[in-house]
Amino acid sequence: MNDFNNGQRPINIDFNPKKVTRYVAIGVFVVIAIVMFFMSWKDVEPGEEGFVYRPYGGGVDKSQSYSEGSYFIAPWNEMITYSVLQQSKTYTSTVMDKNGTDITVEVAVNYSVMKNKAAKLHLDVGKNYIKIVDDNSQGAIKDVIGKYTYEEVYSTKRTVLEGEMASKLKKSLAENYFNLEYVKIKDVNLPKDIAAEIVAKETQKQRNLKAKEKQKEEEYLANARIEKARGDSSLIISARFKAEAIQLEATQIAKSPQYIELKKWEKWDGIGSPYGESNVFGSGVSILKSN
């Protein structure tokens, strides 16, 4: 009582439940607004294309696509993204050629999702779109390879085969919103007996080449002995140099298979292939295998 008498006034707290409720509601609203603001920013990564899915109004928006960057959309909507980068898949298929011989080929297919078509791809096919690429690729490989013989597959018709497969795939993939970048035959696997036959044929060719060069060498040496007996020194020297040149060429062949390739190109007349009918795609690349 003395304190009150000394002139001090009691503390009077004005507690208004309505005001407190209002302040709390404003605070909660501000927090929610801040959270929703940050949740509304969606990222599209480099190499991706995005589109908006609106579950409460319109579904997938096919009218607008989004390239890489950050975008503000309502937090209850979803940004769905698809990769539009080039992708590659290798298919190994055992196919019967037109004569009934089983051959195994490895074919690489490079493709990408068409730009501005990710939303349609999502609606028509979905995220598991690789099955569409698989089915079309394997079908094209079997259809094209089956029209040729195994000799044509592993040698002379490689470019033709790749072109035909690309033509079939380009059309079928485009119908499903894909670009075809390229088709490449990576490997050919022939039956064991056929592979052995081809290797034996190539080995015999090399033996014949060496025998032919040896015969030339002996002929030049014989001519040199004849000319020596006649006493014509200039012809002796010419024959000797020719024999030495043949010996040098035989040495180069033994040391470096690439030297054989050089001689093939030197003798090529621009018609057909310098590798003949039994080449394996050219440039000395041997990819023959046996099952």
Image: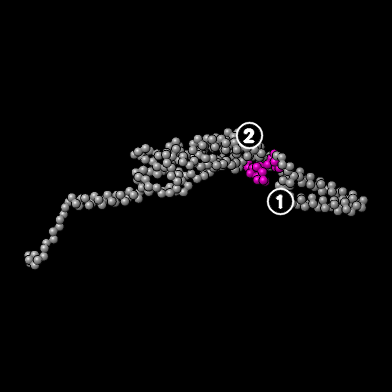
Q: Is residue 137 magenta?
A: no
Question: What x and y, as percent, mark residue 183?
Answer: 57, 41
**Vertical order, 112 against 5 (above or below):** above
Residue at image location 18% in from the left, 50% down from the top = 18
Q: Residues within 10 Å of mark 2 (few under 14, many from 20)?
A: some
Q: Which residues are magenta?
A: 273-291
36 sits to left or right of 287: left
What residue is pinned by disc 2?
Answer: 148
Q: Residue at x 35, y 39 (%)?
A: 55
Numbered tag placed on residue 286 in the rendering: none
Instruction: Identify residue type, mark 1.
Output: Ser
Say if residue 89 shows up in the picture.
no
Q: Is residue 162 above or below residue 22?
A: above
Picture coordinates of residue 8 (x, y %)?
A: 11, 65
Secondary structure, mark 1, is loop
The amino acid type found where label 2 is placed reads: Tyr
In space, the residues marked 1 and 2 are separated at their CA atoms by 34 Å
- Queried whether the magenta region covers residue 284, the answer comes back as yes
In the rendered image, which quarter is residue 2 located in?
A: bottom left
**Residue 210 seen in the current view:** yes
Query: What is the magenta segment's predominant secondary structure?
Result: loop
Residue found at the far front of this picture: 63
- Left or right: 213 as drawn, with respect to 138: right
Q: Quadrant of the C terminus?
A: top right
Name the quadrant of the N terminus.
bottom left
Q: Residues within 10 Å of mark 1 (few under 14, many from 20)?
A: few
Tell me if label 1 and label 2 are in contact, CB under 8 Å.
no
Residue corresponding to mark 1 = 256
Q: Give whichever of 262, 52 is nearer the camera.
A: 52
